[in-house]
Image (cartoon, grey):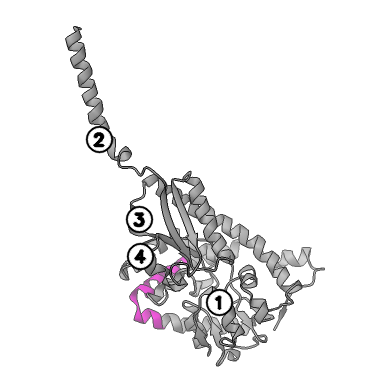
Amino acid sequence: MTEKKASSSRRGLLKGAVAAGALAAPMVSTAQTGPINMRWQSTWPSKDIFHEYALDFAKKVNDMTGGDLKIEVLPAGAVVPAFGLLEAVTKGTLDGGHGVLGYHYGKQNALALWNSGPAFGMDANMILSWHKYGGGAELLAKLYASIGANVQSFLYGPMATQPLGWFKKPITKSADFKGLKFRTNGLAIDLFTAMGAAVNALPGGEIVPAMDRGLLDGAEFNNATSDRILGFPDVSKVCMLQSYHQSAETFEIMFNKTKYDALPAKMKAIIAGATEAASADMSWKAIDRYSKDYIELQTKDKVKFYKTPDAVLQDQLKLWDAILEKKSAENPLFKEIVASQKAFAERAVKWDQDTYVNRRMAVGHFFSDKKKPAGKA
């Protein structure tokens, strides 16, 4: 080959390389040169374990992306009130947030079916199973579209059944709720209103001050650790365990959809994996922390725990029937979600009940010499 031809050949190769580079250029030249920073807010006070869960998720994402995505999580009220999270994330005032779907109840009541609905015998992990594999995620996207919410939602974090609440004296019958000034949220507002309570929906950080000032006669929040940290034993020494008002709640991780859609595919995959990892870790941490604080509430804070009477639980289930009928008649999307949940629950709960061995029998066998902390009202 002559030098002239060789030179021409090399130029051709270089041109080909440049052309090939130009085709790939968007992946390199337009890539973000520094980390992507996101400012989030939770719907929880900074001292609550729920805010800790939000920080845990953010750390997993930050670590798994090697710092390419950095999520900063602020506590409730830092930018917007707890109940203002959805609007703030939709507008882009915040890049994302951590909360529960029931806090958006006022914008679309069907959203609360993921956290304060009847659940049809499912626990929170079953709700997450229905959400991922039974059509729940698609229905949630449909719901958000119906109200113009510009968000990408991820559900995670199965919660334990929540106590009926904290009271001045034990609840012995449903009639005890007549005229009671009570705090709850989501669809549980309809349930306790039907039981005769005067309901006030307050975010977590405002409940204990309201009880202390006499604005509330009773309230529910979530679990032994949160309730202890937030100061419930300072204003009440009676806690009723077990209820159908929030028997299967989950957390929500929320991104502004425009900002989420602009993320690289690899980063989206990391977020999805981090969400499921955080879900498992949160459920394990909850068992450890809640069980410890359950003991502390009794031994150090002198709280008396009582099981909610079966008659009250049965009344709740009957009231759910009427609430579901009314809401379904008013809201076609509500009706569609209820039907989907109920169909999934019918087979999942039957399988669960038939398969899992009775743990109460094992507890009675191995720990029968231990004094049971929860009494009967």
Residue 7 is labelled as: none
**Identity of the residue drawn at 51% across and 85% down:** 199
The amino acid sitting under disc 2 is: Leu
Q: Which residue is mark 2?
A: 23
Q: Magenta residues?
A: 326-344
Front of the two marks 1 and 2: 2
Alpha-carbon span between mark 1 and mark 3: 37 Å
Horizontal relation, residue 49 to residue 95: left or right: right
The amino acid sitting under disc 4 is: Thr
Alpha-carbon span between mark 3 and mark 2: 25 Å
The amino acid sitting under disc 1 is: Tyr
Q: Residue furthest top?
A: 2
Q: Which residue is mark 3?
A: 259
| Tag 2–tag 4 contact (CB < 8 Å) | no
Which quadrant, please, contains the N terminus?
A: top left
**Identity of the residue drawn at 38% across and 64% down:** 89
**Identity of the residue drawn at 23% across and 21% down:** 13
* Residue 360 rendering spot, x and y as whole percentages: 70, 67
- In the rendered structure, which disc, 1 or 3, sits on the residue that comes first in sequence? 1
Work out whether residue 183 or residue 213 is closer to the camera in this orientation and state it: 213
* Residue 254 visible from this viewpoint: no
